[in-house]
Image (spheres, grey):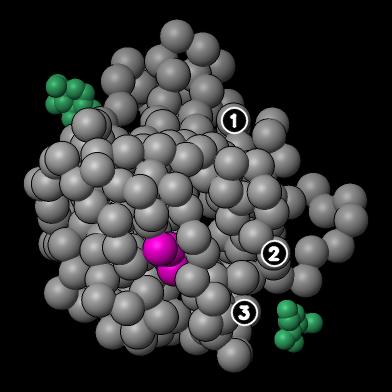
Amino acid sequence: MTKLSVLAAGLVFTGCASAHTIFQKLYVNGVDQGELTGIRAPDYDGPITDVTSNDIICNGGINPYHQPVSNAVISVPAGATVTAEWHHTLNQTANDPADPIDPGHKGPILSYLAKIPDATQSTVTGLQWFKIYEDGLTVSDGTWAVDRLVANKGKVSFQIPSCIASGQYLLRHEIIALHAASSYPGAQFYMECAQLNIVGGSGAKSPATVSFPGAYHGTDPGIKVDIYYPPLTNYTIPGPAVFSC
Ligand SMILES: *[C@@H]1O[C@H](CO)[C@@H](O)[C@H](O)[C@H]1NC(C)=O
Ligand SMILES: *[C@@H]1O[C@H](CO)[C@@H](O)[C@H](O)[C@H]1NC(C)=O
């Protein structure tokens, strides 16, 4: 693409202000746990843009949660494959070109876990998070995690580590859309938290953790970034390294 067409593409994508998304269903080893079951999801599908806000933890502040919030806790065997499903809105209609998300909302997809005394408790400040999954830019063909999500009709799968302690956790699952991220604030953070009870974990390892807010900064190369020009030759996914057993 020429510089002009790249800029024009950027303008077009930046114009799509309302094509947002919500993580609203979880599958455990392929088994559908039900719409909004065990997930704290807002009715409004707009992003968080302030990485210092408590809304960056589990949403639900400026975008209040759909009521009543599910009090289900999803049982997940350690080592299981879970699949998160995203849609444009909670009231998804057929043939929506912006479902699961506007295809212009390019960026990475990330998942974190935090141990919590009670997965249904409303307080989510002060938790210690570790990253269990990330997918960013495939430089060789220019495709993003969001492109793969769109191709997969809103589904993204990843593994729950087998070596962590059993118990109650929150799963923080996130898309960062970078179409307007050339200045900060600009990157759009979409996240919801799912309430898990992880069973059968060996507890052999204790992951290093980070805080939300705190793990992200407006100056991070993966948060303040022009994804259109010049073409990216690398992309640094925000947050810590992925924990592995
Ligand atoms: C969307 O669906 C939720 C229930 O899932 C409902 O409470 C809400 O009113 C609906 N919103 C619209 C705009 O229909
Ligand atoms: C690409 O890598 C360089 C060198 O490590 C780094 O300075 C830069 O921030 C990276 N760019 C992105 C968008 O992550």
Instruction: Please say if 82 is above or below 88.
Output: above
Q: Residues within 10 Å of mark 1 (few under 14, many from 20)?
A: some
Image quadrant holding the N terminus, namely top right
Say if residue 57 shows up in the picture. yes
Figure quadrant, ligand 1: bottom right
Q: CA distance from mark 2 to mark 3?
A: 17 Å
Q: Nearer the viewer, residue 237 or 154?
A: 154
Indicate which disc, 2 or 1, sits on the residue closer to the N terminus.
2
- Horizontal side of 51 relative to 143 (left or right) equals left
Determine whether the residue tagged by mark 1 lies in a helix, strand or loop.
helix
Give the overall secondary structure of the magenta segment: strand
Q: Which amino acid, by three-letter code, is at mark 1?
A: Arg
Q: For the residues carrying marks 2 and 3, which lies nearer the camera in this image?
A: 2
Determine whether the residue tagged by mark 3 lies in a helix, strand or loop.
loop
Instruction: Please say if 15 is above or below 56.
Output: above
Q: Which amino acid, by three-letter code, is at mark 2?
A: Gly
Q: Is residue 196 magenta?
A: yes
Q: Nearer the viewer, residue 152 or 189?
A: 152
- Using the image, tell me which numbered label, if any, was put on residue 112: none
Q: How many marks?
A: 3
- Using the image, tell me which numbered label, if any, was put on residue 34: 2
Q: CA distance from mark 2 to mark 1?
A: 23 Å
Q: Which amino acid, by three-letter code, is at mark 3?
A: Asp
Magenta segment: 193-197
Q: CA distance from mark 1 to mark 3?
A: 25 Å
Q: Are marks 2 and 3 in contact (CB under 8 Å)?
A: no
Indicate which disc, 1 or 3, sits on the residue closer to the N terminus.
3
Asked if disc 3 is less than 8 Å from ligand 1, the answer is: yes
